[in-house]
Amino acid sequence: MQEIRESFTLALGLISSLDVDLAEIVGLSLRVSLSAVLIALTLGLPLGAALGMGRFRGRQSLIVFSNALMGLPPVVVGLLVYLVLSRSGPLGVLGLLYTPTAMIIAQTVLITPIVVALTREVIEQLNREYGEYLASLAVRPAGRVRTLLWDARYSLLTVGLAGFGRAVAEVGAVIVVGGNIDHLTRVMTTAIALETSKGDLALALALGIVLMILALGINAAVMMARAAEPRPLPRPAH
Amino acid sequence: MNVNQNAPGANPGKSLFRKQKPARIAGGISLALLTLVWLAGPTTAAERSLILQSTTSTANSGLYDHLLPLFRQQAGITVHVVAVGTGQAVRNAMSGDGDVLLVHAKSTEEQFVADGYGVERFDVMYNDFVFVGPPADPADLTVADNAVDALSRIATSGALFTSRGDDSGTHKKELSLWRLAGINPSTASGTWYRETGSGMGATLNVAVGMGAYTMADRATWISFANKGEFRILFEDDSALFNQYGIILVNPARHSHVKAEAGQIFIDWITGIQGQQAIAAYELGGRQLFFPNAR
């Protein structure tokens, strides 16, 4: 219990003193996880929308597959990306292992299924409501995807936040492909793992608190951005 | 809603995929890749650096935080340390994912060189292993004659013992001691013999948590912050000697290996300046590693 009390004091101290090392670690955490979210959204939104609206063979299997992939253990993703990026692996020549890029790739692999699966759910619901209406307006499929994605943007923000949450909180993938190298690939979660292994539980927990505050800040910022935007037009009557 | 009404002739009943322009998908993917390249940019700086595959014991004790800034100052080379168990470090080096290997399992290191993965092995420094445990000392380790006797006492008493179980240098050493004691602890795995499959620090956390004995390198033990009531119960046996060695990953096998920078680092750490720096590193008034390069 003493450690928990101590860790709050430590966390406050770390934040208020603007600790340089901490800022570096926090910065890399944000850079890696936000990049992964950005790429996962770029890939996952159209894929998820297509899965939610399309009618094609194998769609059901793809949905089950993308849902199952949400449960991918980070360490397995890390291992797969490691094997691909290792100097002995197929993409070894790129020399990406133990770089932030490798960590971004791993987290992208980890959270793209989440974006696909949740987007599919959101868009399928919307399509049920608007599908016929849009069809009656003779909107082309690509236009329908765009329209529904735009209309669902608030729900999709939550999808992005879910992806970000998973990315910024995982340690299994980034520690394998990043190597937790000081001043190069150390992020919040790998730093927490390191301090735990050093037995410095109070500092580990303090870093955890900083990570939570960070997540709170980002979620609050998104919420405020959302509140500042005018609500979309009222839904059309059927 | 932003509804595109200038789309005559669309047939929404058909597949979406066939209607989507491949160019758009390709555009999305290339945008993603561009973002990736852009984000990767700042790390590929022109400064000289190398990757050192090493063990948690050397990293967690703070030794590298002491040595590497000195080396950087003198040689202008940044050393990036990947700290994992010896077994994993050796495997990573075999795959070419590192330029230099600094670990502590001599026979494994010699095999690594013999198999052509490394150029040559050099001694760097040593310290020793200790047995730590709860102050009640149920297996009476404090009166053990030697390390092998200490392990026999644990096995006979059935007191809990946590093993690294992760193919690390410490784990290999522990297994060799069990062999000397004529005991096969794996038959007791899950009962009194508990393999954590984790690093030294994590294993110490488990040992402290369940009141179990464990074997640790002295440097990790001294720098470990979550000792609780635990203390060293057996030490000072030549069988507990812990030698660290350094090897340049063979550039003939992996052409990307930074052989020149790696060799500079090896020459430095086995040379006068590196050896003195190792001897000068203390924690809590105690020297953690003893240089012994020839």
Image: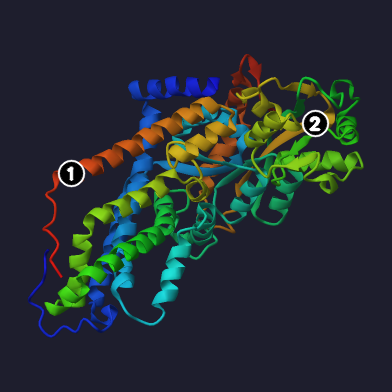
Nearer to the camera, B34 or A204: A204
Question: Which residue sits furthest left?
Answer: B6
Q: Residues within 10 Å of mark 2 (few under 14, many from 20)?
A: many
**Percent position of residue B83, x then y:** 57, 40
* Residue A233 position by quadrant: bottom left
Residue bearing the label numbered 2: B240
In this rendering, would A67 be left or right of B42?
right
Q: Nearer the viewer, mark 1 or mark 2?
A: 1
In this rendering, would B86 be left or right of B32?
right
In this rendering, would B227 be left or right of A102?
right
Q: Chain of mark 2?
A: B
Residue bearing the label numbered 1: A227
The type of residue carrying mark 2 is: Leu
What residue sits 14% from the left and 52% below the top? A231
**Marks 1,2: beta carbons within 8 A:** no
What residue sits 14% from the left and 76% below the top? A139
Question: Which residue sits furthest front?
Answer: A238
What residue sits 70% from the left and 20% below the top? B229
Task: Identify the secondary structure beneath mark 2.
Answer: helix
Screen quadrant of the N terminus of chain B? bottom left
The type of residue carrying mark 1 is: Ala
Tell me if residue A176 comes above or below residue A60 in the rendering: above
Task: Identify the secondary structure beneath mark 1.
Answer: helix
**Percent position of residue B276, x then y:** 61, 23
* Residue A126 position by quadrant: bottom left
Nearer to the camera, A47 or B235: A47
Tell me if residue B163 comes above or below residue B37 in the rendering: above
What residue sits 36% from the left and 27% below the top? A20
**Percent position of residue B143, x then y:** 89, 21
Q: Is residue A232 visible?
A: yes
Q: Residues within 10 Å of mark 1 (few under 14, many from 20)?
A: few
